[in-house]
Amino acid sequence: MNKVFAIFAIVGLIATASCGNKEVKEEETVETVQEATEGAVEATEEVIEDTTDSIENAAEVAVEQVEEVVENN
């Protein structure tokens, strides 16, 4: 009977130890995903700002060209 109790105790300790490692890995994975998401958001914001600036510059050039054509005619 003592051997059976010892075997159950060992199996329980192994199961508990293996479950503990999964939680740490999940937390690390969540942190990694959060960092990657933040980086992607920052990169997207930069692209949006650059695109907005390019569109504004193109619009200004178009307005200037239209004004020149109107003045010349």
Image: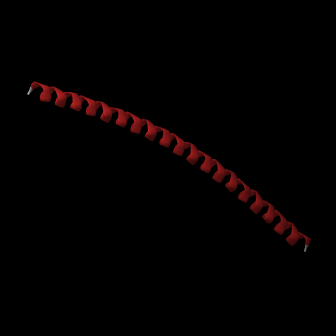
- Judged from this view, the residue extending furthest toward the right is 2
> Residue 40 versus residue 21: which sits nearer the camera?
40
Quadrant location, the N terminus? bottom right
> Residue 51 versus residue 2: which sits nearer the camera?
51
Residue 71 place in picture, x, y as percent: 13, 26
> Residue 6 versus residue 32: which sits nearer the camera?
32
Residue 42 place in picture, x, y as percent: 49, 39
> Residue 25 versus residue 70: which sits nearer the camera?
70
Residue 39 place in picture, x, y as percent: 51, 40
Q: Is residue 22 left or right of residue 11?
A: left
Residue 33 place in picture, x, y as percent: 56, 48
Quadrant location, the C terminus? top left
Note whether 64 is above or below 13 in the view shown. Answer: above
Note whether 9 is above or below 64 in the view shown. Answer: below
The residue at 80%/61% (across/down) is: 13
User: What colouring method underlies this structural image?
Assistant: secondary structure
The residue at 24%/29% (across/down) is: 61
The residue at 57%/43% (across/down) is: 35
How many callouts does the rendering have?
Answer: 0
Note whether 69 is above or below 11 in the view shown. Answer: above
Q: Is residue 1 left or right of residue 51?
A: right
- Judged from this view, the residue extending furthest toward the bottom is 1
Q: Is residue 8 left or right of residue 21?
A: right
Q: Is residue 13 left or right of residue 50?
A: right
The residue at 38%/33% (across/down) is: 50
